[in-house]
Image (cartoon, rainbow, N blue to C red):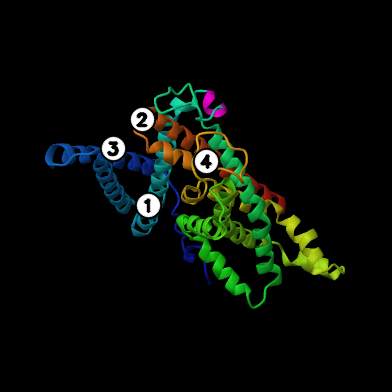
Amino acid sequence: MTTLLDEPVRRQLRIVDVEDRAGLVGSAVAGLSLTWVFYNRILPTEGTLGFIVCWWLSFTALYLLYTGLRRGRVVLTDRFAVLLAHSAAALVGIALTTVIGYTLIRGARALIHTNFFTQDLRTAGPLEPLSSGGALHALVGTLIQISIAIAITLPLGILCAVYLTEVGGRASRLVRSVVEAMTALPSIVAGLFAYVVLLIGFGMRLSGFVAAMAISVMMLPIIARSSEVVLRLVPSGLREASLALGATQWRTVWSVVLPTARPGLATALVLGTARGIGETSPVLLTAGFTTYLNLNPFSGPMVSLPLFTFKMSQSPEPNYISRAFGAAALLLVVVLLLFAFSRWMAGRGRSGSR
């Protein structure tokens, strides 16, 4: 007869008591002290990055030694995996914070001036102060170009996803392979494609419309692939119920599938927009550069925020470099807002599905 004494004892890997926390802090302090002694006093080494790496290695070795002696091999393996995961997350967070913080700090000199958002560079030369001129033409150009790109790619991307998920056929595998391959398409190739087809082939001139077409090439596979994944998550029971009530396949897709997947489709649109709005190579070859505001995307050059940043950063003048960082910070804020909106829409869609 099996008794309670014969039952196997389950290992508790994730229990952390006071001694474990004290060991973690002690290992960090001991690793810092050991690294300081060897790195600065004994070995002929220097540099902040090398010091941080050596400190992390010594801290990891001491903490794993303490955990192994106190908890055993199984817990040691688990703690080592947890430490690697937290270290990788911290590294990514620090890198992202550094990039965002550095861009915002360098761009603050231009962003604090209201004219940066209300004026163009029509009358502001390289030696003009930051209180004169701005990036209004680049901001408006970005909004116009991305609006045209959305108007082109949104219906095409959703129709492509509907074909792959609802229609299918012999060509669906080929279409899916092409879409997946285009997801990793270099942006310069999209710019060259628009340059060769529209500028050389059709004789068009540099304009915002040509730039929007190049951006559409970058956005289309993102929207199509993301929309396909979202449409596949729609329960098949909803389709079957609609068909059982006598609705056609087109009516089922239009009235059942697409409304159900609306939050996910909005997320796919935002992801594609965030990809296209920050592209520099396509607009560098197709949009042209100008210092004045142009509201007509079919006539004349139309600059965007990425192109404005690229051109301003090439100047040796400090004010132009500050304008470049200001435009980069503005573009960064727009992209972060788009991704935040995408996460909010995704969370709203999950809560609504429950």
Residue identified by numbered label 3: 29
Mark 4 vs mark 3, CA separation in Å: 52 Å
On residue 303, the disc is 4
Earlier residue among tags 2 and 1 = 1
Mark 2 vs mark 1, CA separation in Å: 44 Å
Mark 3 vs mark 2, CA separation in Å: 46 Å
Three-letter amino acid code at the position of disc 1: Leu
Give the residues drawn in magenta, as a range. Answer: 114-118
**Residue 243 inside the magenta-drawn segment:** no
Three-letter amino acid code at the position of disc 2: Glu
Tell me the crowding category of disc 1: few under 14, some 14 to 19, or many 20 or more residues within 10 angstroms, Cα based: few
Residue identified by numbered label 1: 84
Mark 3: secondary structure: helix
**CB-based contact (under 8 Å), mark 1 and mark 3:** no
**Residue 117 inside the magenta-drawn segment:** yes
Magenta stretch, main secondary structure, is helix
Mark 1 vs mark 3, CA separation in Å: 19 Å
Earlier residue among tags 1 and 3 = 3
Three-letter amino acid code at the position of disc 3: Val
